[in-house]
Amino acid sequence: MRHLFLAILLVLTSCSNDDNTSIDYKNQNDEEIKSYIETNNLTATKTESGLYYVIDNPGEGEAPTLADRVKVKYKGYLTDGSVFDENQEGYSVWLQSTIIGWAEGISKFKEGGSGKLLIPAHLGYGSNNNNAIPGGSVLIFDIELIYVNYKTENDLEIQNYLANNNITATKTDSGLYYTINTPGSGLQPTENDNVTIDYKGYFTDGTVFNELTADISLDIRTLIEGFAEGITYFNEGAKGSLIIPSHLAYGNTGTPSIPEGAVLIFDIELKSIN
């Protein structure tokens, strides 16, 4: 089935290109939603925008903002039960890229939360037909917010990597993991120092994205956050690994060679503090 979000990655205002026609549906849609709620014995909350939502489980994790990327299981259907899209594996999308009612509604849940969104047309596709969705339609979504950004997802990936490779690592307050396989005997750098290191960078599947073994000198202040923090746990001469979640690296955007949300692993040797 064609995923709805391939069709709704638009600017938020584009949902209401035909505001005058969309307004005609507001009262009609509101009555339709109220009738659906009563018929299905739902307890729903209405927002100022006209969105209705039902929280079955509020969740306990992070709450998303419009600037966040979310991963959601969902089923989308009309009030007559006709399903127009579904994804039960989890779909990743920037929240600000979705239809207005969906973006507002998801923000009512925390990570792990589930429930229902009942979206009137002026917060969906207005008077415009959109594939299997007729103009003026109320949209209903059963949703489960799996992850916000990549923090929880990355931490599970790291824990699985450690378990599968029989590695014992230390986790810091920031979410960084590190191991020291060969302790050094020299000083430990601060985040204001310049250091000489060798390193190999790779993903949890073993794919190498960068490797430098020529005693490169680096200003710690110029490094990604996880690397800058991690190197300060090493003494001169130490060897070990940094396992860095994406929020301490390249985040939701990635780089040309590093996918968005990627966990990065660096095997490093701290040669000297310069």
Image (tube, rainbow, N blue to C red):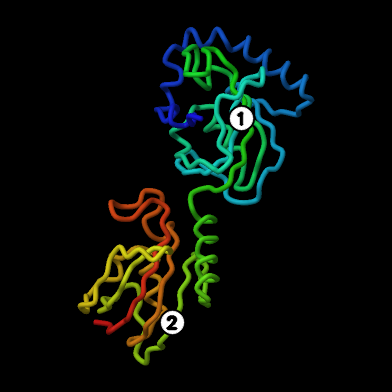
Helix, strand or loop at disc 2?
strand
Q: Position of residue 46 (x, y in %)?
A: 66, 25
Find residue 183 and report its image quarter.
bottom left
Q: Position of residue 130 (x, y in %)?
A: 47, 18
Vertical relation: 69 (above or below) 27:
below
Residue extending furthest bottom? Answer: 185
Q: Position of residue 164 (x, y in %)?
A: 53, 70
Residue at left 76%, top 27%?
42
Q: Are marks 2 and 1 in contact (CB under 8 Å)?
A: no
Residue at left 69%, top 28%?
45
Q: Which mark, residue 180?
A: 2
- In which quadrant of the rendered image does the C terminus lie? bottom left
Vertical relation: 182 (above or below) 37:
below
Residue extending furthest front? Answer: 1
- Residue nearer the viewer, 24 or 140: 140
- Amino acid found under the numbered disc labelled 2: Ile
Q: Which mark, residue 172?
A: none
Residue at left 28%, top 82%?
273
Helix, strand or loop at disc 1?
strand
The residue carrying mark 1 is 141
Please tell me which of labels 2 and 1 falls first in the chain. Answer: 1
Vertical relation: 157 (above or below) 217:
above
- Amino acid found under the numbered disc labelled 1: Phe
Q: Position of residue 257 (x, y in %)?
A: 29, 55
Q: What is the spatial separation of the Cα atoms under label 2 and label 1, in whole angstroms?
A: 48 Å
Residue at left 65%, top 50%?
60
